[in-house]
């Protein structure tokens, strides 16, 4: 093996090692890759993604209030409000906690990936190796529903919190564990007091 070949191999290895760190994360929504005029960024290990472009791709309407520096996004009966520099956006008035605040880059609002992906009930997967973000606008049901069967959580109108008849925990309807409760096992409560009176404990994940 001559020294030129060694040199070339070392160079290739360098390129290979450096490339992933320089790559801009790609974002795929429901199998379609999104393009942005301002790219997602990674800051302090947190991925921030363009809020409006993704929300609009999900079918939401986004309004920006210059005075309050806040974005309001509406899709169906879900309203998301997010203020620049704050870590407490709301979804239908319920306060959510962000690790890092949303910020403006080149006139675009960038917000934490998971919040943006899940605000309207979707799911987010992050592939570190490929720097690829995969979003699904609707969560995939763990159990395929036979045709004609109502989707889970169809009883959302019956209360504020949901539990399972086979456990003693209650959840907010958006909790991933609430999603797993089959319709026939759902038990709905109008208040925490009602749930407690029935012997139910708050879930440690969604902290209702
Ligand atoms: Zn829960």
Image (tube, rainbow, N blue to C red):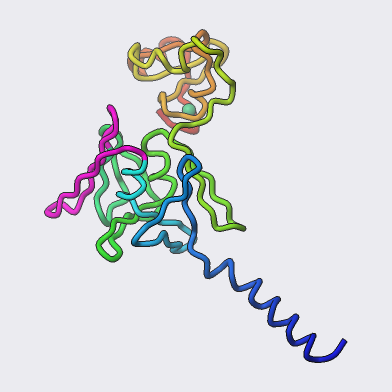
Instruction: Name the quadrant containing residue 167.
Output: top right
Q: Position of residue 25 (x, y in %)?
A: 49, 59
x then y, percent, for residue 4: 78, 90
Q: If the image is split into quadrants, where does the C terminus sit?
A: top left
**95 vs 28, nearest the viewer:** 28
- Quarter where residue 16 is shown: bottom right
**Does residue 7 appear left or right of residue 49 in this picture?**
right
For residue 117, above or below residue 129: above
Name the side, left or right, on which 151 lies relative to 73.
Answer: right
Query: Number of callouts in the render?
Result: 0
Q: Which residues are magenta?
A: 58-79
Magenta includes 67?
Answer: yes
Give the residue at the far right of this rendering: 1
In the image: residue 87, left or right of residue 182:
left
The residue at the point 49 percent across, 33 percent down is 205
| Location of residue 176 with respect to 80 vertically, above or below | above
Residue for point 38% across, 48% down: 98
> Which residue corresponds to the image point at 19% horizontal and 49% vertical from the top-left?
64
Estimate the x, y position of residue 164 in percent, counting from the top left: 51, 14
Residue pushed farthest left? 67
Which of the pair 80/8 is nearer the observer?
8
Q: Is residue 122 left or right of residue 102?
A: right
Q: Out of 5 and 93, give the one closest to the viewer.
A: 5
Residue furthest bottom in the image = 3
Q: Is 119 rendered above or below residue 3?
A: above
Where residue 204 appears, x then y in whole percent?
Answer: 50, 31
* Residue shown at 41% from the left, 59% from the top: 40
Q: Is residue 174 magenta?
A: no
Q: Quadrant of the N terminus?
A: bottom right
């Amino acid at each position: 093996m001559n020294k030129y070949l060694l040199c070339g191999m070392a160079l290739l290895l360098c390129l290979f090692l450096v490339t992933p760190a320089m790559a801009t994360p790609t974002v795929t929504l429901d199998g379609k890759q999104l393009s942005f005029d301002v790219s997602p960024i990674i800051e302090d290990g947190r991925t921030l993604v363009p809020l409006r472009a993704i929300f609009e791709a999900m079918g939401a309407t986004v309004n920006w209030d210059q005075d309050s520096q806040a974005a309001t996004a509406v899709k169906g009966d879900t309203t998301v409000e997010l203020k620049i520099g704050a870590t407490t956006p709301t979804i239908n008035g319920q306060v959510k906690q962000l690790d890092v605040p949303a910020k403006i880059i080149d006139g675009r609002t960038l917000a934490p990936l998971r919040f943006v992906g899940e605000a309207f009930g979707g799911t987010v997967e992050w592939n570190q190796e490929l720097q690829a973000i995969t979003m699904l606008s609707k969560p995939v049901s763990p159990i395929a529903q036979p045709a004609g069967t109502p989707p889970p959580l169809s009883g959302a109108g019956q209360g504020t919190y949901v539990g399972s008849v086979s456990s003693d925990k209650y959840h907010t309807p958006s909790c991933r564990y609430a999603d797993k409760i089959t319709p026939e096992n759902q038990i709905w409560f109008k208040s925490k007091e009602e749930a407690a009176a029935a012997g139910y404990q708050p879930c440690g994940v969604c902290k209702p």
